[in-house]
Amino acid sequence: MGTDIRVATNQAPPLVGHNVVTADRALVEAITRHGSPDVVEDLAPLGAEAGSAEAREHGILANENHPQLTPYDRYGNRIDEVRFHPSWHWLMGKAVSHGLAATPWEQDSPHAHVRRAAGFMAWSHTEPGHGCPISMTYASVPALRADDAIAKEWTPLLASTTYDPGLRAPATKRGALAGMGMTEKQGGSDVRANVTEARPTSTDGEYTLHGHKWFTSAPMNDMFLVLAQAADGVTCFVVPRVLADGSRNRLDVVRLKDKLGNRSNASSELEFDGTIGQRLGDEVRGVRTIIEMVAATRLDCVLGSTSLMRRALSEASWHAAHRSAFGSLLIDKPLMQNVLADLAVETEAATALAMRLAAAVDNATDPHEAALRRIALPLAKFWVCKRTPFMVAEALECLGGNGYVEESVMPLLYREAPLNSVWEGSGNVNALDVLRALSREPEVLAAWITEVGRARGADARLDRVVDETLAMLGDSATLEVNARRLAGRMAACLQGALLVQFAPAEVADAFCASRLGTSYDGVFGALESGDLRAIVDRATPAL
């Protein structure tokens, strides 16, 4: 009998049914290093759920069924509601219940932020778009602490593990979500150019806002931190979606953005015309107030990009382990091993740096940890988020034509890959922030030197690049034009130092030889030596 052409052969089975946490050896090692084995055990149920067929299906449905803006109800009343597919709500409910929103700020645990960071990375495998409102909710709490009364009012709701969607008075809700409104069409990242006006009312601390916000994600959230021009300058305000008396605040959703990716998440333009806002912190200190939220969301940009890398690597290595070509499995082909190993090294380096930053949040009262967080966040945001599109594109190619088809999920990851490099400051903004920190806060350079110095003498290539990077800092005339190169070098040195200390020898050697060596060709799959198969096997999911 001939072959039944209706039955597919030599196709990789779907990658479902594995535990996204425990199958990621680099992540488990980082959790254990910065937290404890108990944290891994605590996250195992989340990892199993994230790798389930049910979660993957919800992720697909949330992206296929985009949010829809309903400006008016059937009677003509302005309501400005955004409706989401049930799969979006399923994903959001799980994320909140697993404590991935603002829960760590209310937990009495020495590893609360490490746990949350690892959980955020793992859960983002399901679908990255819903991570945006989760991230903003997490990040809002440090900024809210500028006013004790406001923080006391909102933090318990934001830290709740109950997902309670819908526009209602905050006092009637079991949980809440937060967002931010910073950028305007004429200014973008230059928020000091904002023109939205804040006018004080007769109530102490209350203002009405008048203006336009160019890019505000998740407009169905319960509260937003917004920048506006008060009499003395740029000031931060808490803007509730629904006021205490149950009436809706005057917040008009003009339209939803038609984005390259992140399709499950609603990003909007907002108009304020008499919108009530409560001042958060002093007038003219708005940027300083909201920068705490920006710092926390930058961490999530790093975590989210690392998650995209890991999901792409898992799909690529899984495909190669099950697909045969020219007489053997792809994973046994030397050149494919080289590509997959290189992708794995990139992912391990991102994971090590991301989790190190989460540990710095847990230890924020330590001066070294605080200074390291200040400099390493923009470094990691610049470097990891910049590397992600390049890495995901290579992983997609490992699947060949199958990877270019929507059903493979790789196109979704590819569209998402550039996003975190844009959000919370583009590459230039973060590179210049590195220079700003170095010029104004001398302790941050000392923290970077201390951190990379812990690996001093372990790898000559790393030592050489650290010395070259320090030499770059001495040329003040070229610092700004070379800010990207400097940021990339400083970030890669941090990654190299972590891998040399904690990763398997073959991973650390491959990273230092390629990223810090003198013969790097700028392409994946150009590793020159080492146990490539061991690196690949370490990265390949097992059911």
Image (cartoon, grey):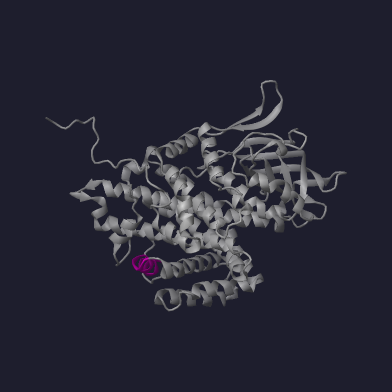
The reply, left or right, for residue 441 in relation to residue 481 is: right
Q: Is residue 64 above or below residue 385?
A: above
Q: In the rendered image, which quarter contains the N terminus?
A: top left
Figure quadrant of residue 432:
bottom right
The residue depicted at 44 percent of the width and 62 percent of the height is: 349
Q: Is residue 366 magenta?
A: no
Q: Is residue 496 above or below residue 105?
A: below
Whether residue 366 can be seen here: yes
Q: Is residue 506 magenta?
A: yes
Depth check: give the residue in front, 535 or 366. 366
Q: Residue furthest top?
A: 75
Q: Is residue 461 above or below residue 166?
A: below
Figure quadrant of residue 358:
bottom right
State how many labels appear: 0
Depth check: give the residue in front, 201 or 96. 96
In the rendering, at what x and y percent does residue 392 appear? 41, 51
Q: Which residues are magenta?
A: 504-515
* Magenta span: chief secondary structure: helix
In the rendering, at what x and y percent does residue 313 appear? 38, 52
Depth check: give the residue in front, 231 or 88. 88
In the rendering, at what x and y percent does residue 294 appear? 63, 55
In the rendering, at what x and y percent does residue 278 appear? 77, 46
Q: Is residue 341 above or below residue 204?
A: below
